[in-house]
């Protein structure tokens, strides 16, 4: 099963976290991790614990901020939300990603596809 | 901005570690709880929900580490861990730590101190602003002492006005005598002090500003102007209790009310720059157009070059100016007699001669550091061998090799940092002591201090040595095979053996380095012995000199001479009568101090050769002086009958007599009784004296001529006394007698003649002692190294030795074998070291006196010493080996 899951490219997790927070507003660590898993259709290989390294990194950069609060089922949890700088950064990074993916698409559209192991990147 | 923010976050995270960890744990806890709640909501049993939540979360510890790594300064974290571990480890092994720190303290301390000396004397510019512009201007060297190294006041004027290369030229009176000031305060005994007469622009040219008051101006130097004086910081503090209101006060100095106009800054030390080893208390203005104008060559030149002017240009210009320089403007014949003055950087004049000695010293101390590093490497290897299982275990548990090397390097860094701190303290003590050694004739010693450059050097030495001595053991450990070490339960196998080979190589290196050092020190020591053995032409033992004050104020030279003779005769009669006095006499200059020459008296009726740049050094003496000095005379000594109106008589030394006799073809080559032409008057040679080393102990004796004080005017008077008692015991009775005769006699120092010789030899002694001390330290370290290796090898082979003894080998055989191992190491070390010494012989050869750099005796003595050390340091382990009880040895493990 793990074979068919995607390994994350360097830096993509940070971007996913930012995008999730932009879309969902304030979320706790578990929420972010679940959301990423759900959106990716469980295709991303994510140890949920690793999200915390990403969160602390983003917070130190000032792209997200955190606050302790109470979750919907009454648990004390730390909630993260995106900052304005974070939004700008995300806009910049997503533009870059879109350019890159469109270039990659055109590359692959170029000729006969290898098309053996679609899971490999 | 972003980066800075992040860094700030990281640094904060580093310090707030505990709080952040607690928070992270809380967050993890919340995460799991919410996940479990979620899973339960999806219909899992609580146990299953928890299991699934943990699976999804992944490795908790991993997540924790990753988060810490992302948030904080991981490298520093590791460093802190290593430091903590190192300190604990070092505390647990106090013997090792103490030995290692002792070695490092000595080696680094010596290095800091020597660097500071080298930096102060050789590397740093002189303590004047834009010191690179300053030049020393002197005639090319000639064999007639100070008189041929100086210029007349008229020549100074001409050179200063005629040269365009300089911002200004200044100079000082080169013949100022120690104790030339007599300061009378109240009715007490006058205090002797030393001042130098300088040309009034001296301080402007050097760029020295007063700490208080003002320095000299042109008015101060006019003939007949009121006497003024500038005090040095040291004298102001010592003699005048640092009186803040001293400016404008007048004191009785040499019988005249002299006004203090300024105090020099602490940083200006005339003696340290221009006359090493002499203590200068004050400076006084030299009157260029007064009396000194008729004194001949008296001034040394110092110039400050215009910016952009090169030495070569200044030299070219000097060649143009020289022909118009006159010895005396009133005597046109004396014009153009000066050889072209040669400007050299002042720094070269001050410390150029010492460069080679300093380089050798620096090398020697560097070798000590190297030996210390090798030694520590060895100690650490032994420790590492003992810890090899610990390291193997850590490797097996997944520690990276890099991490282990890092741990070991941290250990050596910590050792070396502590060693450097202690070393710095040691260096401060050494330097403070050295800076107060006024009697060592080395320039700038009083300026020694720990400055920024020295601190930087300390850091560099400490780091470099930590890497050097930490890396070998570190790499050794890291390259080991953990499996082998873990299996290696007995001390006699694999890794142990490899360690031993490496350690033997280290010891051989140590012995070789120590050998090179010892040979160097041995050669310097032998040179020093040769220097002490030099026949100086006088006997310094049991002779002492004291500066005498006397009155000879009178109108005419004749009247002055009469007064002087009376004073001298009184003094000598009274002093000779003191118990313990064998002989007494008075001279104006002592050997190895100052000197002068008055041209060359030539045999009467013989044509002078065209070119002669030597002139005999002149001494004006009383009867009995040469006997007091222990200088032998052939012919006769002066007598009091050689009075002012009698035939002018002189004594000359052998070399001069020999030269004259050869040149004039005197019968029997004998100078006695011959008549010389002494500038228009006849002078008769009545005695030929031994050659006296008047300028240097080591150099060749030059020419000397002695005039009787009854017929020539002396400059000052030094009473020399030869005693049957130690000179110190006579000091008070001699001074008492002098004071009875002349209440103005200052409390001058009663200085043994041996002190003059010591002073002249002090730079050589200084270098010899230091290199010798380093060599002994090197020998000690090498001995320690040999002992360590042999001792370790005995421990490792305990079982083997036990078996052999059980099989019948007797104690003597075992001892011999252990000792031979030690001797073998030393033999290789000596071979390598001797080769190294021969290869580096050229470095020391110029420092040697009457000693070959390949001196066989020195080499043999050093080899013997090293073998002796090898025997001694091998003996203890050998004894231990032969005392091994086979039963105990075999039962062990």
Image (spheres, grey):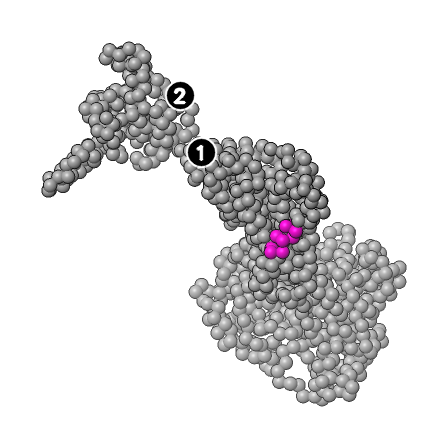
Figure quadrant of the C terminus of chain B: top right
Residue that protrudes farthest toward the front in the picture: B807
Q: Which segment did they paint magenta?
A: B820-829
Marker disc for residue B696: none
Secondary structure under tag 2 reads helix
**Residue B767 in the image: x percent, y percent?**
64, 57
Write the residue at 67% across / 38% down: B886
**Subunit of label 2:** B
Residue that mark 1 sits on: B396
Q: Nearer the viewer, mark 2 or mark 1?
A: 1
Quadrant (top left/top right/bottom left/bottom right) for the N terminus of chain B: top left
Residue picked out by circle 2: B22
Residue B165 is situated, as x and y percent measured from the top left of the image, at 47, 68
Rendering coords of residue A120 (x, y %): 20, 34
State which quadrant residue A106 falls in: top left
Q: Residue at x 53, y 45 (%)?
A: B498
Q: Residue A121 or A35: which is nearer the viewer? A: A121
């Amino acid at each position: 099963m793990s074979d068919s899951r995607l390994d994350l490219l360097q830096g993509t997790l940070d971007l996913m976290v930012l995008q999730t927070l932009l879309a969902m507003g304030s979320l706790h660590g578990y929420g972010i991790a679940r959301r990423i898993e759900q959106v990716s259709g469980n295709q991303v290989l994510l140890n949920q614990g690793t999200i915390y390294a990403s969160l602390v990194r983003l917070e130190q950069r000032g792209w997200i901020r955190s606050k302790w609060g109470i979750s919907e089922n009454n648990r004390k949890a730390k909630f993260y939300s995106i900052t304005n700088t974070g939004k700008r950064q995300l806009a910049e990074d997503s533009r870059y990603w879109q350019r890159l993916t469109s270039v990659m698409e055109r590359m692959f559209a170029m000729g006969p596809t290898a098309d053996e192991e679609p899971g490999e990147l | 901005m972003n980066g800075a923010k992040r860094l700030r976050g990281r640094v904060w995270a580093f310090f707030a570690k505990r709080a952040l960890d607690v928070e992270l744990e809380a967050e993890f806890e919340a995460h799991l709880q919410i996940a479990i709640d979620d899973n339960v909501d999806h219909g899992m049993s609580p146990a299953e929900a928890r299991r699934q939540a943990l699976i999804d979360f992944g490795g908790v510890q991993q997540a924790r580490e990753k988060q810490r790594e992302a948030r904080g300064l991981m490298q520093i974290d590791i460093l802190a861990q290593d430091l903590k571990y190192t300190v604990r480890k070092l505390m647990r092994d106090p013997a090792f730590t103490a030995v290692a720190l002792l070695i490092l303290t000595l080696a680094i301390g010596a290095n800091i101190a020597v660097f500071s000396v080298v930096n102060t004397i050789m590397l740093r510019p002189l303590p004047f602003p834009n010191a690179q512009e300053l030049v020393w201007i002197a005639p090319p060297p000639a064999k007639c002492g100070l008189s041929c190294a100086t210029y007349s006041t008229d020549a100074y004027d001409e050179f200063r006005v005629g040269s365009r290369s300089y911002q200004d030229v200044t100079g000082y009176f080169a013949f100022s005598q120690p104790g030339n000031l007599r300061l009378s305060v109240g009715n007490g005994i006058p205090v002797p002090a030393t001042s130098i007469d300088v040309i009034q622009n001296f301080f402007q040219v050097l760029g020295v500003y007063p700490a208080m008051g003002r320095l000299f101006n042109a008015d101060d130097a006019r003939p007949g102007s009121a006497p003024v004086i500038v005090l040095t910081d040291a004298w102001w503090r010592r003699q005048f209790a640092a009186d803040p209101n001293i400016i404008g006060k007048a004191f009785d100095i040499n019988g005249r009310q002299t006004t203090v106009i300024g105090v020099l800054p602490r940083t200006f030390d005339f003696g340290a720059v221009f006359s090493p080893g002499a203590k200068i208390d004050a400076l006084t203005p030299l009157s260029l157009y007064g009396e000194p104008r008729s004194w001949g060559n008296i001034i040394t030149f110092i110039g400050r070059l215009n910016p952009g002017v090169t030495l070569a240009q200044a030299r070219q210009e000097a060649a143009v100016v020289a022909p118009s320089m006159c010895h005396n403007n009133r005597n046109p014949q004396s014009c153009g007699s000066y050889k072209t003055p040669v400007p050299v950087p002042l720094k070269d004049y001050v410390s150029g001669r010492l460069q080679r000695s300093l380089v050798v010293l620096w090398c020697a101390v560097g070798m000590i550091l190297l030996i210390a590093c090798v030694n520590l490497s060895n100690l650490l290897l032994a420790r590492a061998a003992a810890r090899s299982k610990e390291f193997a275990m850590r490797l097996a548990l997944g520690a990276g090799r890099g991490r282990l090397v890092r741990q070991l390097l941290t250990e050596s860094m910590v050792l070396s940092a502590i060693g450097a701190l202690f070393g710095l303290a040691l260096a401060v003590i050494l330097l403070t002591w050295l800076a107060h050694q006024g009697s060592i004739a080395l320039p700038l010693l009083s300026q020694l201090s720990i400055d920024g450059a020295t601190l930087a050097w300390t850091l560099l030495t400490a780091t470099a040595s930590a890497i050097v001595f930490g890396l070998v053991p570190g790499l050794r450990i890291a390259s080991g095979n953990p499996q082998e070490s873990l299996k290696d339960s007995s001390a006699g196998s694999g890794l142990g053996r490899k360690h031993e080979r490496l350690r033997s190589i280290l010891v051989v290196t140590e012995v070789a380095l120590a050998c090179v050092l010892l040979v160097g020190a041995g050669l310097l020591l032998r040179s020093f012995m040769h220097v002490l053995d030099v026949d100086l032409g006088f006997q310094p033992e049991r002779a002492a000199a004291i500066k005498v004050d006397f009155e000879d104020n009178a109108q005419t030279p004749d009247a002055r001479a009469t007064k002087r003779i009376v004073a001298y005769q009184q003094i000598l009669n009274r002093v000779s009568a003191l118990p313990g006095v064998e002989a007494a006499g008075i001279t104006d200059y002592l050997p190895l101090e100052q000197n002068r020459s008055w041209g060359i008296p030539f045999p009467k009726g013989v044509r002078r050769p065209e070119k002669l740049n030597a002139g005999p050094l002149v001494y004006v003496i009383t009867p009995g002086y040469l006997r007091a000095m222990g200088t032998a005379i052939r012919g006769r000594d002066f007598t009091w009958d050689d009075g002012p109106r009698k035939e002018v008589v002189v004594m000359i030394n052998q070399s001069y007599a020999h030269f004259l006799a050869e040149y004039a073809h005197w019968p029997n080559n004998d100078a006695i009784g011959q008549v010389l032409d002494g500038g228009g008057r006849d002078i008769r040679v009545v005695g030929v004296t031994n050659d006296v080393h008047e300028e240097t102990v080591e150099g060749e004796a030059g020419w000397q001529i002695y005039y009787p004080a009854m017929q020539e005017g002396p400059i000052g008077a030094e009473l020399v006394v030869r005693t049957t008692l130690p000179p110190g015991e006579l000091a008070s009775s001699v001074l008492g007698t002098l004071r009875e005769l002349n209440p103005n006699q200052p409390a001058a120092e009663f200085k043994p003649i041996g002190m003059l010789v010591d002073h002249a030899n002090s730079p050589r002694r200084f270098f010899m002692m230091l290199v010798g001390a380093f060599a002994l330290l090197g020998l000690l370290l090498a001995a320690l190294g040999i002992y360590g290796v042999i001792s370790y090898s005995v421990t490792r082979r305990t079982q083997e030795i036990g078996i052999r003894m059980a099989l019948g080998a007797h104690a003597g055989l075992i001892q011999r074998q252990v000792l031979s191992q030690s001797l073998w190491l030393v033999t290789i070390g000596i071979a390598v070291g001797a080769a190294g010494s021969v290869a580096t012989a050229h470095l020391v050869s110029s420092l040697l006196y009457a000693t070959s750099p390949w001196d066989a005796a020195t080499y043999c003595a050093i080899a013997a010493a090293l073998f002796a050390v090898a025997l001694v340091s091998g003996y203890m382990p050998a004894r231990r080996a032969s005392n091994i009880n086979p039963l105990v040895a075999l039962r062990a493990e």
